[in-house]
Image (cartoon, grey):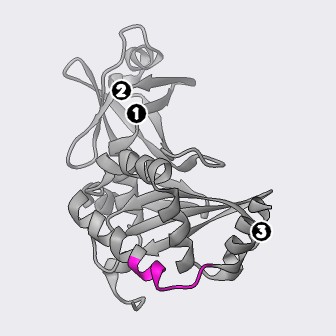
Amino acid sequence: MGDTQDWTAAPGAAERARTLLATAWSCAVTADGAREEYVGAHTVADDGAVRLAVPDDSALTAAALCAPRQEPPALLEFADVAPVPVRERIRARLYLSGRITPDRGGFLFRPARVVLRRSGGAVVVGLDGYAAARPDPLAGAEARLLTHLADAHPDAVERLTRLIRPESLHAVTRVRPLAVDRHGLTLRIERARAHGDVRLPFHAPADDVAQLTERVHALLAQASAAACPRALQRQRADGDG
């Protein structure tokens, strides 16, 4: 599989941002110096605008009443939390800055700046790309799929490590499924005092759960043909002893 094949690439920053926004359960809002967290209070329009339904006695409502034209500047923060217990479960954070506008008994927020922060650093997402991007089609099923893989098929997770370079598995203590999207599966490689992530790209994008199942089975077939990493062989031998 060559690096020039777009379908093997990880999702771009705009798609990741829209996916995170679509799946996050809570939203932290900072306006007029006050910060509050709301659960289940936001919805997202097709263009990425965010609607907020907050209590009348919220700090955001007070900030809107005191701001010129009732449009206070605000910062919205969203966190992407791994559904499977791993070290450092926050996979990414999304920051949207702009102005809040009263709308239909709630508030409408159109971002003027979008920043996605991941373990590798932060990236500013272009507004046009953000507005045009769509969430990953597997986002709604990701938590269920990863939890099932981790809890019911740990043997399959171990088999997938055969696709990872042996040197990347040195001193490994645990391997867990961290993320899945239409382009591939990501494993979290944990060691005693550190961790890293390894991405296993699919041979073609998956647009639904049926296609995802086929893609994962294809990875497992590749893994079955590969030799078991020596690091895991030693780990199993030590555990048996």
Q: Is residue 227 magenta?
A: yes
Closer to us: mark 3 or mark 1?
Answer: 3
Q: Which residue is mark 3?
A: 171
The residue sitting at the top extreme is: 57
Q: Is residue 73 above or below residue 130?
A: above
Q: Which corner quadrant of the image does residue 171 belong to?
A: bottom right
Point out residue 191 in the picture as x, y percentages from the top left corner. 74, 61
Q: Which mark is residue 40?
A: 2
Residue stretch rendered in magenta on the structure: 221-228
Q: Residues within 10 Å of mark 2 (few under 14, many from 20)?
A: few
Point out residue 58 in the picture as x, y percentages from the top left corner. 43, 13
Q: Which residue is mark 1?
A: 25
- The Cα atoms of the two marked residues, 2 and 3, are separated by 41 Å
Check contact, mark 1 vs mark 2: CB within 8 A.
yes
- The Cα atoms of the two marked residues, 3 and 1, are separated by 35 Å
Q: Is residue 186 above or below residue 226?
A: above
Q: Would you say 112 lies left or right of 59 here?
A: left
Q: The C terminus lies in which quarter of the figure?
A: bottom right
Q: Amino acid at mark 1?
A: Trp
Point out residue 109 in the picture as x, y percentages from the top left corner. 32, 36
Q: Earlier in the sequence, mark 3 or mark 1?
A: 1
Is label 2 in a helix, a strand or a loop?
A: loop
Foreground: 116 or 210?
A: 210
Q: Is residue 102 magenta?
A: no
